[in-house]
Image (cartoon, coloured by chain):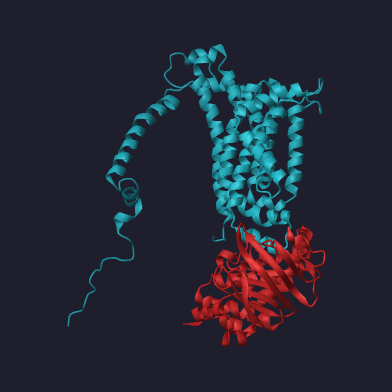
Amino acid sequence: MTERTVQPHEDWSRPPAATTGAIGWMRKNLFSTWLNSAMTLGALYVLLTTIPGLIQWAFIDAIWGDNPPEVCKNVPGACWSFIYEKYRFILFGVYPWEEHWRPLLAMIIFLTLIFGSCIKPLWALGKWIIAIWVVGLTMVGILMWGGILGMEYVDQSQWGGLPLTLFLATFGAVLSFPLAILLALGRRSNMPAIKAICVAYIELIRGVPLISILFMASVMFPLFLPTGVSIDKLLRAVVGLILFSAAYGAEIVRGGLQAIPRGQYEAADAMGLTYWQKMGKVILPQALRITIPPMVNGFIGGFKDTSLVLIIGLFDLLYTTRLAFQDVNWRPYFVEGYVFCALIYFCFCFFMSRYSQWLERDLVKGQNY
Amino acid sequence: MAASDHTAAQPDHDYVVELRHVHKWYGEFHVLKDINLQVGHGERVVVCGPSGSGKSTMIRCINRLEEHQRGNIFVEGNELTNDLRQVDAIRKEVGMVFQHFNLFPHMTVLENLILGPTWVRKIPRKDAIDTAMMYLERVKIPEQANKFPGQLSGGQQQRVAIARSLCMKPKIMLFDEPTSALDPEMIKEVLDVMIELAEEGMTMICVTHEMGFARTVGDTMVFMDQGEIVEMSPPSEFFANPKNERTKLFLSQILSH
């Protein structure tokens, strides 16, 4: 009797090699059809022709370190010495040079507040978060203005660069948000007068470019004020940004409100909840979750729109960058300046984008719907 | 607006709900035609009729999810008018269960149950949780308290919805086709809860096609067609001996198989 040997079977415990791993992935995503293969190869060609040149310019041929402009003459690569020379001006504008530690510290506090508020375990602090913000913003204000504790007073007309851009963007976004919600609720109100006012406001603001609103806030608005009364330029810019983004935000929130099924409104009504309880507890928590992606899209847009405040003479980050290469010695190196500025913008926008994706996923965790 | 000419209208305090000559139009379309209905304490009314007959619209008028345009509606002796405080006061006393459950998907089951008691009835949170757990026991799903509605089956969701209404300690429960959106195997678990509720003496108005349920617990059958109450009688008589031709036709259609 011969011992029966088990025939080596085809292995069913794992999928065929050609459908998994790197090769499987490439087959599926890059070379699935003729068109797809052609596009893959085309993209590869474009990358191969541009990337090496870019690396050559930005790193290999570049001049690094603190050098005078003459060193960069006739060099094919980037002249990062320009950034070494000018980064403090780009970041802080015309803020007095010896006092730069103040906006730097203010900015660190401000960013700590923002990033700290994004960290979920810290939300457990609840109402303390507001208190922390108040304390933090007071410190930022003291540092920026000075005038006490032996710090020299610096008028806000001398503020500039990154702190200014961050202040404008943050206050524009944060303060426009509640206004946007109120406008959206107003637009869906049963009360004709409130509805009409909200519709008129939203349509009017959306129909006008941001530049003209900033311009009006800056040039026209003071004409209507009695002589002697003046509202600060920076404040007017912030108010202009808030009013502008609120109109766009309102339409985003309205979209979210419309996406909530009627049954949710009815169930809340049937329970006897008041209008504000219904909105605050049932409708808005659901509607705002849906609006996270378009809202963040709006915030990112708003962050970059702050660069328009240059037309009313505020020195935001982009404007200080441009002023930096107005210096006769460094004029040829504007590309380096823009790259530096773009990287800063990119870091913040990319953070917002990633954070919103995380937030969106986190909020639906466990809810399965 | 005829709903406001109630100078002479006085409620009859023997009834929990009373509808007098109620009319409603959607634009030109006359959805409710001269509806008269009285529901006494502990009475179980089952409303049936073909789709589009105005059944849902009628019970939705009782807690003002729809506005009637003519006639009077009294709930617990209070008339439903445009006075919003009056409407909110009445809604506190009227529980409603919907066809599609309408649980709040962003809250856990327990949070769904305590929302009304804590915000509308202003009951301390701890007491509200105790009551909520008591009702979850009664609908036999206490173990689901901390899940989200989306993680439950349809039948479980509807039982949560019933518990949610009960947590408000309503004087009357309205059921708007509570089993129509359920898979067949889940209908019974919901009907069992409703039967138990009826046996405890809850005043109920149920829009449903579950004729077995109607026979078991109903005190009064109401048959509606084209916006009118065509026939109203106790179930024994209603099923054995329908008077109206339209009722006969309807019953033959739903009982033929």
- Please name the residue shown 54% across and 81% down the image: B248
Q: In this image, B32 relative to A128: left or right? A: left
Compare residues B79 and B152 and report the one nearer the observer: B79
Q: Quadrant for the N terminus of chain B, please.
A: bottom right
Asked where in the image residue B131 lies, by quadrant, the reply is bottom right
Please count the marks in the image: 0
The percent coordinates of residue A355 (x first, y second) are 57, 45
Asked where in the image residue A223 lies, by quadrant, the reply is top right
- Please name the residue shown 20% across and 79% down the image: A3
Compare residues B101 and A230 and report the one nearer the observer: B101
The answer to whether residue A68 is seen in the rendering is no
Asked if A348 appears above or below B7 in the picture, the reply is above
Q: In this image, B187 relative to A3: left or right? A: right
Asked if A88 appears above or below B42 in the picture, the reply is above
Q: Which chain is red?
A: B
Q: In this image, B255 relative to B171: left or right? A: left
The percent coordinates of residue A115 (x first, y second) are 64, 42
Compare residues B215 and A92 and report the one nearer the observer: B215
Asked if A184 appears above or below B88 in the picture, the reply is above
Of all residues, the one furthest to the left in this rendering is: A1
Asked if A334 appears above or below A208 in the picture, the reply is above
Q: Which chain is cyan?
A: A
The percent coordinates of residue A40 (x first, y second) are 32, 40
The percent coordinates of residue B157 (x first, y second) are 59, 69
The answer to whether residue A114 is seen in the rendering is yes
Compare residues A49 and A254 and report the one nearer the observer: A254
Q: In this image, A63 relative to A216: left or right? A: left
- Please name the residue shown 57% across and 83% down the image: B212
